[in-house]
Amino acid sequence: MSCVRFALCCLFREEPIRFRRATARGLNGLDRREQLERLSRIALDNAGALMESLDACRGLGFGGFRINSQILPLRTHPEVGYRLRDLPSAHAVIDGFERCRAYGDRHGIRRTFHPDQFVLLSSPREDVTRSSLDELRCQAEVSALVGADVINIHAGGAYGSKEAALDRLMRALEALPDPIRGRLTLENDDRIYTPSDLLPVCARTGIPLIYDVHHHRCLPDGLSVEECTDRALESWMDGREPLVHLSSPRGGWDGPDPRRHADFIDPADFPDHWTSLTRPLTVEVEAKAKELAVRKLLADLAGGTPGDDAASGVSSATP
């Protein structure tokens, strides 16, 4: 387990850290100067909240943090969108993000992004692909500032033909500019695309697979957890640390909808195979109880209680 680091996703349950959001409706009644001033204050506050989040992760013994993709809210919105340099406090925001990058690097806290579901590179609609690329460009810009090495997306819908959708996806991936391509990953989902569907895409394009074991259990494809783990790890080349997702079903595997995430992780859902890996691995914990769930999982895997030194020691990997 010394090679496994555990990462928190986006938010805290009990830690007094909050990221601010904005809505287009709330901005529409303002003139452009007022819009940018409000967005600038939110961006600056969110840069501060990110630093607090990284510091909290360090204190809790977590080795990674998934950053909310709306840390710069409404960035690509067709009506109230903006460029980072348009914000009155742009230099202070950039400085705040760069300090987060330095802090994360210094303390070995991995940073990642997982854009919203509207980012689709397999859609037959050119306007959807175009807006998705705009969003990914903005995500890549922020990723460079904060030092995030992953921008993770799903494959999207089948749109009547999974084969045609995967072909569009591959062509879009191959045409990506390096700042996006060097960070982009694909994740198997729980309704359409299995690891078996995506691994050939990853092999052809060089885009790594983030293996979501919960999704795979909901949508099996004949491959074992061990096989999927090993093949997913092989897709992470050039010394990059692989990343996987872990969650448990609300109501158990015999419940009405095992796709829904539980508050906490059942330790039985943590694959035994992952404990035997010698390669560093990041496990993003997708659970509703947020940091409480990660702490409990660490304690369960270490055989201790939350807060034990043994529990916190499990979470760090060599960055």
Image (tube, rainbow, N blue to C red):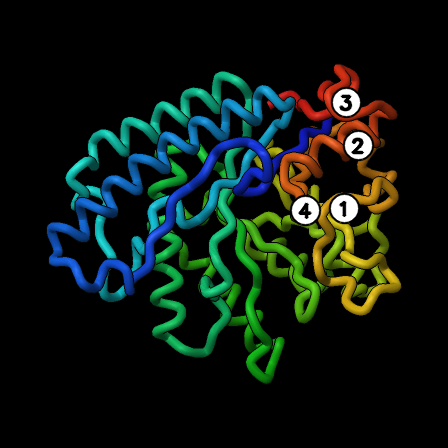
* Corner quadrant of residue 71: top left
Circle nearer the N terminus (2, 4):
2
Question: Which one is nearer the viewer's eye here, 284 or 50?
Answer: 50
Tag 2 residue:
277
Is 265 displayed left or right of 189 in the figure? right
Q: Position of residue 5 (x, y in %)?
A: 67, 29
At 67% from the left edge and 42% from the top edge, which residue is drawn?
285
Image height of 8 relative to 205, above or below: above
Tag 1 residue:
229
Amino acid under label 1?
A: Thr
Residues tagged 1 and 2 counted as in contact (Cβ below 8 A): yes
> Which secondary structure, mark 3?
helix
Image height of 188 relative to 96, above or below: below
> Which secondary structure, mark 4?
loop
Q: How packed is label 4: few (under 14 Cα within 10 Å), some, or many (20 or more)?
A: many
At 65% from the left edge and 46% from the top edge, which residue is drawn?
235
Circle nearer the N terminus (1, 4):
1
Between marks 1 and 4 in the image, the one whose residue lies nearer the viewer = 4
Task: Work out which quarter of the rendered image holds the N terminus and state it.
Answer: top right
Q: Is any part of residue 41 visible from this angle? A: yes
Tag 4 residue:
287
Question: Which one is nearer the viewer's eye here, 162 or 76?
Answer: 76
Q: Which mark is residue 311?
A: 3
Amino acid under label 3?
A: Ala
> Which secondary structure, mark 2?
loop
Is 109 displayed left or right of 49 in the figure? right
Is 51 displayed left or right of 252 in the figure? left
At 32% from the left edge and 56% from the top edge, which residue is drawn?
74
Amino acid under label 2?
A: Leu
At 66% from the left edge and 62% from the top edge, which residue is drawn?
189
Is 18 displayed left or right of 84 in the figure? right
Residues tagged 2 and 4 counted as in contact (Cβ below 8 A): no
